[in-house]
Structure formats: structure tokens, C-alpha cells
Amino acid sequence: MSTEGNALADRPRSSVVGIEVPHESAALHVTGAALYTDDLVGRTPGVLHAWPVQVNHAHARITSISVDAALAVPGVVRVLTRADVPGINDAGVKEDEPLFPDEVCYVGHAVAWVLGESLEAARLGAEAVEVAIEPLPAIVTIEEAVEAASFQGTPRTISRGDVETGLSTARHRFGGELQIGGQEHFYLETQAALAEVDEAGQVFVQSSTQHPSETQEIVAHVLGLRSHEVTVQCLRMGGGFGGKEAQPHGLAAVAALGAVLTGRPVRLRLTRSQDMTMTGKRHPFHASWEVGFDDDARIVALRTTLTADGGWSLDLSEPVLARALCHVDNAYWIPNIELHGRIVKTNKTSQTAFRGFGGPQGMAVLEDILGRVAPALGVPADELRRRNFYRDGQSTPYGQPVRHAERITQIWDRARETSTFEQRAAGIEAFNSAHPHRKRGIAITPVKFGISFNLTAFNQAGALVLVYKDGSVLINHGGTEMGQGLHTKMLQVAATALGVPLDLVRLAPTRTDKVPNTSATAASSGTDLNGGAVQDACRQIVDRLREVAAPLLGVAPHDVVLADGRVSAAGGGAELSWYEVVAEAYMERVSLSAAGYYRTEGLHWDAVRMQGSPFKYFAYGVAVTEVDVDGFTGAYRTLRTDIVHDVGDSLSPLIDRGQVEGGFVQGAGWLTLEDLRWDASDGPARGRLATQAASTYKLPSFGEMPETFRVEFLERARESGVIYGSKAVGEPPLMLAFSVREAIRQACAAFGPVGHSVELALPSTPEAVFWALTAARQAQAAGRPAPRAEPEAHAAGSNGLLDGVPATPVPAEG
Amino acid sequence: MSARTEVELAATVNGQVRAMDAVTGATNALDWLRAQGLTGAKEGCAEGECGACAVLVARPDEQGGTRWTAINACLIPAASLDGAEVVTSEGLGTPGELHPAQREMAVRGGSQCGYCTPGFVCSMAAEYYRPDRRACDPGPERGPNGFDVHAMAGNLCRCTGYRPIQDAAFALGEVPDDDPLAARLSRPAPAPRATVLDGETAFVRPAHLSDALAALAETEGAVALAGSTDWGVEANLRHRRVPLLVALDHLPELRTFEVTPERIEIGAALTLSEIERALAGSVPLLEEMLGQFASRLIRNSATLGGNLGTGSPIGDAAPALLALGASLVLTSVRGDREIPIADYFTGYRQSVREPDELIRSVRIPLPLLPRSSFLKIAKRRFDDISSVAVAIAADLDDGVVREVRIGLGGVAATPLRAVAAEDALRGRPWDLGTVAAAATVLASEGTPIDDHRASARYRAAMLEQSLLRFHASTTEGVAS
């Protein structure tokens, strides 16, 4: 173990990390005092309001845009069109996402923007803009795209062993398909930006963005400026979840362009319907698969083709696909495996990052397979899962050793024990035989999730720590706060690293002129990366202060200890206060500020061969969930969830528990409730998102929370090589929600004969559950044996959702 | 109309009187509050689904005092706050001096991104101050302090998963005597105020029904609103603008509640929350329906008049009222008329109501049929719109179907009575044979469609299942 790793991970005896503290802005949140980007409008005189000109056609060539009538609307100041762009007309970095398009690529595509003295004027102006179009054929579904060979990006394959032999010699062989729904982020705060230009032409954009540096880069290239002429600030976000990783940039650029052209501040905030129709979502996926098991129900071979619906532009689809492929295995050892991935181009919003970033879709494939085939193998689903876990010394299909593989079984057994799984499963059996119209189900599922950006270069971060003469500390870092508690953890890290009380440290909003070239706050990596950078900056200052204090204490610098605001010798004796040492340092002309830097060590990834060790480590967790399903309607309640999760040694337990619970419920929403419906008919609404408002797109509310909800962290879980021994927590818990869907599957099975295999659509809405339990009841009534999916049955088409998709894998590259 | 005065509109917000400048009938209360610098209330959806805009208003209770009532500020015209007392999250407490609801939320991790939090805090504070909140045996939806979780069913949080918010709510203690907002409860709520706001979108709130009817008759395109929960969506999402809004929410003639041996008569402008309190469970079918009707935030504003006035085929009230055999009293400058609700709807969002007519009240005949059931089918358990709603009321005396009425929503262009299924039941023994045969008939009632909420096939299946479920509930005690 390297000393670097220990220094990063070791906690001093007296540390502020690990203590339960509320969110640093909690008091501001609850009183409404916390400011979000659009709250600044009332504080900014002379603001212009922006409204998009959206075209309601899935695919069309724009033949002309006439703005005269719009300019005649009272209060309209300017209409922004393509001709106004001085720089590069691209809202992304791949030159496939024109900010002002020539072609309408999806229903609701914004082709121009109107600036008005009021929002109402801008809206009326947008209504008056005349856009002439020439309709083009549109592709809406994955099936249509595959049929038309409408692909984008590079297909990828991960493979190991001999799948063909594995499948053909397997004792049990199954095949099938799964359609995986997308998910709207539904951050409560919609996308927002406020741009101003100062006296020297410096552009200042306040943006609700997870990636200020990329927002800055794109604003600069749209305006034809250099990065040092653009500053982006993010006060905080009202939720991000990945939806503000790539989507805010173009909107910030529109506001900035308006500000430059009019000389006035420009505010752009999407309404909910604009946000839902214009911005990307979690990728819907289609998977076709073949799997083989041996006599002991161990997986011998798996072949699957994942098809991601990327929408109209590439956006983050390639890395999303890579992460999906890297997570099909979840916690299971699969000796022979072939994972093919491809991205289709459709006339929909450009699908993007969403908590888990493809990982959930990848895992969904194998978790669905295991839930479906367990009855056919004659093995309980929980036993089937446990039997296939990774063991020490085994590697993932992409060649990374599974470090701490034993933790999967350890956490699993712990969760079984604390949830009294066995006992409750027996109780459920009794309940079910006594209740003809209601059935309960219990399921346990694991999560193994790789931490780090797949692309190695993104795994770096910077920080700026300032100590003032009065001893107070101000920290800046490159990460953004979206509710996940990053800033809270960074305050704890800084206080720990400097050895001062928490209240001595303040944190300044994230700005690109404080810390440059930052990575997105994404991939659960915010704390690992920025924590490393903050700690590095603090250490530099501490080292200097040790030099200052050493002669005063009469010891060598390395024997000086800073803790709890006191500076003393390691062996005891004389003591100075933090304030005294800081003041002395100033007098001695010792610098009291430092720029910190961190990069994750030990990563390597060949993105073409899809081999390497892209992840610093894996986060593990297990959830046990019990549900109650109503046989009349398919409606269900989550009665209880027990989670055991590995967050390393928690930096901030209240924050981490919030991430685990919130991620779980969000995942349950994706798997069981949230239902994006695009119009795939040939009618005039083709391509329209039918669920584009809170009234039609339902996310979990109080009723979806488990009635009993217990969360426990794995104890003594220090992760070496990570900031103060912690692990990332943002994304992994989302995938604990597979336990909800698998519990629903168990409950549905209880309506059928013993050994009945349940196929369940995803999302498993009450309607989907009703059809699944109806099929089980019919099997019971018919007295026929459980339908088996083997071999090559592609039986999943029965829900009417999966017809017509060829299950043929795409050829491997090269 | 009578002479319009130039009195300035004003509301008391967080104890401070604020004049409403630059307000038109099209300005919603949320935008006005935010323009005042009170940016705690947020826009999350602009259609009353997320509760990020929730604020408290002082409303009259039944005993002559005041209730702090949480509502969605995004749905109501700012002008409707003329004369009102409003408290926002900023008025409940400050970072240095938190309100109990704010303190519990803060220390328990009830806020993550914080955007929904001010709205949650307002819903929570309203329940905190609910006069009949008493310590009780806790259940899954009620805390040991009597806190009803459904008070927050109209607030969405995307970050926390709700557990810490529930813990915060359940940790709230009794209201101390010196609490300034509690002290307000014993005094009357602000008196109804007649309001006139001229302009491109004019707004009037007449003092009397006759003035309201006259205003509606005089102005082409005028829209009547009470709770504004439907109008607010029209205005915010569909950007509908009209020459005149006529607010009915204060009209005493529409705020009556009367029980006689023959009937219960419910004023059309009573809010659904007020109706729940007035009925106090005396009409089980309505109680069951209202408990699933949108959310508390919406029920604090929405009215039966509005729900029936829009003529929506998926409103939850109509199926229940069909099953209850209710009738509507329509009123206009020409006088009153009573229409059975079964004859009221004529087409998609169409009814026999003339443009200048208002619903004055809803009459429910007594005695009620002894057994009833309300089944609402939606994706989400609470605060969702029905894909199908089935209300059943029946007399099953001696195991025979003496009488039955079935109201359906979501399966046709209008709510409707399931006449054929009723015929298949009436006079027959209440056994599984009768029920199964009638359920098949019920499944073929209406003309259900495929849409984003549900497939036609599922809707039809739910019609069938609703009767089977009702039968199970009468024979097995519970719907199990």
C-alpha cells in the first residue's frame, strides 16, 4: 500500500469528517433564503426574458424563419437566430448539436429565441415567429431505428471466454428480450441561466450547471471568445441528477448571446413542459439476451446486445453505453461473456446522463434474467443470486480485478439477517395462501458499482483554499452543489485537514475563475476528486504552518499537530492557538493560501478494446424489499426496505443516508412508476412526448416511500486511497431499487402455480403488474406448468411492448 | 356592474401590507410574491402538482376563527389575495430563528437540494397548526403527534425519498401558547373583500351572487373561478387569456352547507377540505373519494362547483355523485333549476350549463344506499389523475341487490352511469355468479381509449375488477 494512499485515507484522531452534520445550507433551504439562479432575477435590474420558438414536428427541414411579426409584438426586444452566432453554432462539443438548427430533429426543438421586456412579451413574440418547414420522415422507436439502421457513435463490445461453446454446452439455456424505460430527471428546479456582460466585455453567466467548466467552454465557443473572457458561476442547483451535466450549456449560451447583443442581462428559465420536451433524459434501452446455466444454476455464458436510444444527438450516449456494458455483470461472475452495445439515433430529445449513467440499464438486464429464470431453474431467486456472486481473485468482463469481492457476500448475509429475510419469507407464504386477492413478495438484490469516470482524464480536480489573517478559512473547489451534500463534506474535509473547528470554514460558490478546467460533478466522484484537491491545498498550508509553529513549540515541524483549532507538539506540552500561528505566519510572510490538485491514481482504460481498470474501486450494497400487490388492480405498496450499503467510512452520515434513501426511491420510481410515453403513431402528434408535465409524468410521492425504511452502513469499511477512507455514494444506491421490482415479481408469481416464471414490463406500473399477475392466474387456472423461456424463446414479447426487435447481436468490432 | 373604484389591491404578507402594483388578472400569486423579493416559494411545475410554490393563507374555520391553510400560489391570480393574510417560508422563521417545522426539517436531513423545501415547510406548518391535530397511536400515514402525512401529499421531493421529511413531521410537538401564528387562529379570518381590477385581463370578486351572475352575463368570454385549480393550469400551461375573471370563492350564497332529512346540500364554492370537515365521514363514498382527490394543497382550494363546472370526464367527483344519485342546482339571472347529475354532462367538457349559468350547489338525496365503494385507478397511489374511476353504491339487504348505482369516470367523453351493469345486478342475489356476469357487462360499458395513463384494455379490465373487488369487500369484510 502506498504512503500516498494512506495519507489521503487516514483520519486524524480528532477529525470533523465522520460526524453527523446537517446540510451546510439547511437553514437557508428551510427559510427560503437559499438562492437559486432564477431567484437572482429580481435582484438584477433591466433583465430581459428569453422564450424559445419550439417547432412541434419530429423531423423537418427549416426553409425559412420570419421574425418580423415577432418584433412587432410590444415588449419584444430581439429575436436570436442562427445569423446572430459569432462563433461556433454548437451546444455541445461533438459538433452534432447545433444551437440554432437548420433541421428540426424532435418535437419541441427550439430553433430561435425571443427576448422580451417581460416573459409574457417574449412568449407572445415566440408565438409570432413564423417557421416554414418541409417535413421529413421521423424515427421514434428503437425498433424503427434498428430497422432503418439509424445508428450514431461507435458500437462497442466487451468479451471474454468462449460464449458460443458456453451456451451450446450449458445444461439450461434461455433467451429473451427486455425493453427498459427512460426516466425524466425532474429536478425540481428547471434549467436556468442568467447572463450579464461587464464594462470590459467579460461575460458572466450564472447557470444551474453540474459542469461549469464545460458551460464556460461552450458559451465561449458560441460567442467566439476565449475561456478567460467568460466566467460561469453556479450558486447551487435545485437538483441535477445528471440532467445538468451537458444540458445547461446551450441554454447558458443563448442567454450569454442575448446579453452580448443587447447589452442587458438576459434570463432564461425553462418552464417544466419546455424542460421536459427540450432536454435529454435517461436513455431507454432494448436488450436481447441468451444465457446458459450449469447443473448448479451457475451462469456459464451470457450474450447480450444492448441498444441505447440516444435521441437526436450523441451527447453523452457513448460513455453511457460504456458504463452500461461495464455493469451488466453487476455482482456476478460470468466466465464466458459477450456484451455488444450500440446507439440508435431517433427523433427524440438527446438522451443524457442520469444518476447511474447507463449502469442501471446494464444491471437491469441481468437482474431481470435472474428473476425470470429462477423458477425455471427450480432455485429460489435469492439463492440463485448468491450462488453466482464474484469471489476473490475474479475479474470483471473488462479485466478489472474485483477488489473486496468478499464484501458482496458479507453485506448480503448481513442484510438477510437484519431484515429477518427467512422468517418473513415464511410469513409471506402463509399470508399469500390466506389471501386470494392480495399477495406479498420479498426480494433481495445486490449492487456493485464502479467508481471513477470511465474516461481516465476526467478523474482530476482542483481547489483553492484561503486562510485569512483572522484565522477564518474560505474554500473553493470545482464541484457543484445540487443537494447531494458535496459542499458539506468539503467543509468537513477542510476542517479536518486544517485541524480547525467546522464553523471556522466557509465555502464560496463554484466559479470557473476560482478553479479552472474542472470535471463535471458527476459519476459519484465529486467528493473523491474535490475532497482530494481540498485536502491537498489544506496540507500545503498545514505544512507551512508547522514550519512556523515548530520553533515556537521547540519541536521539529513534523512533530507539530494541528487539531481542534490548537497547534501543539505531538508529545504534548506547550500549545498555541490556530489564530496565533496564522497571525505569526502572516508576519513572517508565509503564504496562507494554496491551490490544491488531485488525480485518481491507478486507472487505465482502453476505450476501443473496452479493457482495463477504469474504476478506482467498487461500491457495494444490498437491499431487501417487501411489497404488497392488489390482485384486482395491480397496484402495490412497498411495506419495508432494509438496506446495507458500503460507503467506506462515511464522511458525513446524515448526508450519506440521504443519498442512499433518495437514490433508492428515485430508482424505484424509474423501475415501477415513471413512464415516458412518446407518440409512435403515424398521426400528427408523432414523436410528441405525451407525458410532458407533472400531471402526466408521475414521480414518487409520499405513498411510494417504504412504510418501514432501514438503512445501515457497512462497518469498518475504510477504503484506502480515497479521501479519509470513504466511498462515493451518489449513484450506487439507485440500483438497490431492483429489490422493489423483484419483490413485485415474487408477489405476481404467488398468483400463479409453483414454478411460474413472471415476465414484467419495465417500468412495472400497476397496469404492467396487473398483466403479469393475470398471466400467473391464467397459468394457475389452466393448471399448466410454468412457461419456460428456453431455448431462444424470446418470450418477452407477450406484453405487446417488445415485438419486432431482432435479437441478433451486432457483430463485434474489428 | 356597479361603479368601479380605484382602491388599490393589497395583501398582508408575513405581517407586512404589500400593495399590488403592476398586477393584472393574468398575474399569478407566485409570480407576484417572487417579484416582491420573496423567492422562497418556487415554481416547479406551474400546475399544482409539485407544491414548491406552497404558502399559507388565513382562511375561516367553522367556528368563526382562522385556519392556516396551505395552497398552491402558482394556481391562483395574485388579485385573489386582495385582503388576504399570507405567510411564506420567509415569514415562518429566519435562519437565525427557525420555526419548529423548519428546525426539524433542517436537523433531520429533510432538505437536500432545498428547492422543494419552502413548500414542504408551509404544508407541514399548516398541519402543525391544525386545531384538531392530537397525539394518537401512530400508523403508516399518521405520526404519534397526530400529523397526517397526506398533508404533504401535494409536495414532491426528488432528492430525499421522503423518510427524513416524514420523521421531521412526526417529531413536531404541540404548538406553544405564545406562538404568534397560533395566536392568530382564535380571531376571525380576514373578511371577504369585493375586489375590482380593471385592465386587459380584468378581475372582479363580487360580494353577492347577483353581481357575479350579472358580470358573467355582461362580458363575453368571462370565466368564473372559485379555487382556480383548473383555471390556473389553463393560464400557466396553455397560456389562456380572457377579458374577465369572476372570482366566486367568497360568495356566501355558494358557501352553504345544509343537512335535512331528505338531502345534503353542499355549496358549490366550498372547498373540498371544507366539505370533508363538514361531512365528517357521514357520506362514506364521498369520504373515500375525497381522500384520493388530488392532494391536500389542491383540496384546500378546489370546489365541487369547479370540478363539475369544467365538465371533465376524469374528475373524481362526478362518478361518486352519479352513484349517490345527486343533482345540481344551476343558477343564472333567469333563476334556479335542478338537474340530475346523470343528465348534466352532454359531451367532452360539455354540459347543459349555459355560459352565464353557475352551479350553486350539489344535492345528495337521503337516505344513502348502505354500501359503497370508490375505486380510483392511477399510476401513483396519491395525487394522480384517474385513468378510471368507479363509484358503486348499493343496497344488498338480505343478500339481494335491492338497488345499485354505478358511476364511471375515464371511460367515455363524459362521466356516466353504468346502466347495463346496474340492470344486470338489480333484483338478483348478491353472489359471485351475478357479480361475475354483471362485471362482464360493466367491462363493456363506455368506450375506453388508449393513452399515456392506461390502455383501453386495462381500463375495461378495471371496470370488471371494480365490481369483483366490491363483492369481495362485502363478503370478506375488506378488499383483500
Image (tube, coloured by chain):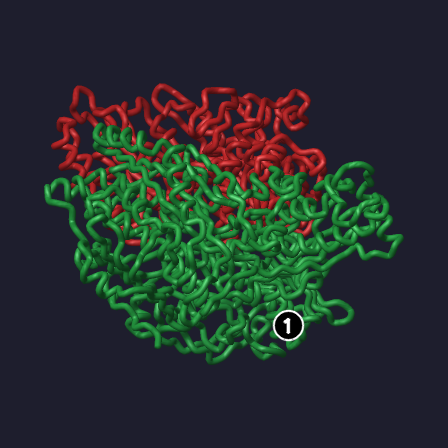
Chain colours: A green, B red
Residue A118 showing in the rendered view: no
Name the spot of residue A279 as percent of width and height, x first.
49, 62
CA neighbours of label 1 inside 10 A, class few (<14), some (14 to 19), many (20+): many
The residue lying at 59 percent from left, 49 percent from top is A9
Identify whether B160 is placed above or below A356: above
The residue lying at 70 percent from left, 42 percent from top is A502
| Residue named by callout 1 | A220
Amino acid at pointer 1 = Ala
Residue A1 showing in the rendered view: yes
Of B427 and B4, nearer the camera is B427
Name the spot of residue B221 as percent of width and height, x first.
49, 52
Of B20 and A29, nearer the camera is A29
Q: Chain of mark 1?
A: A
Number of marks drawn: 1
The residue lying at 81 percent from left, 38 percent from top is A575
Left or right of A372, for residue A306? right
Left or right of B17, for residue B54? left
Quarter of the view holding residue B451: bottom left
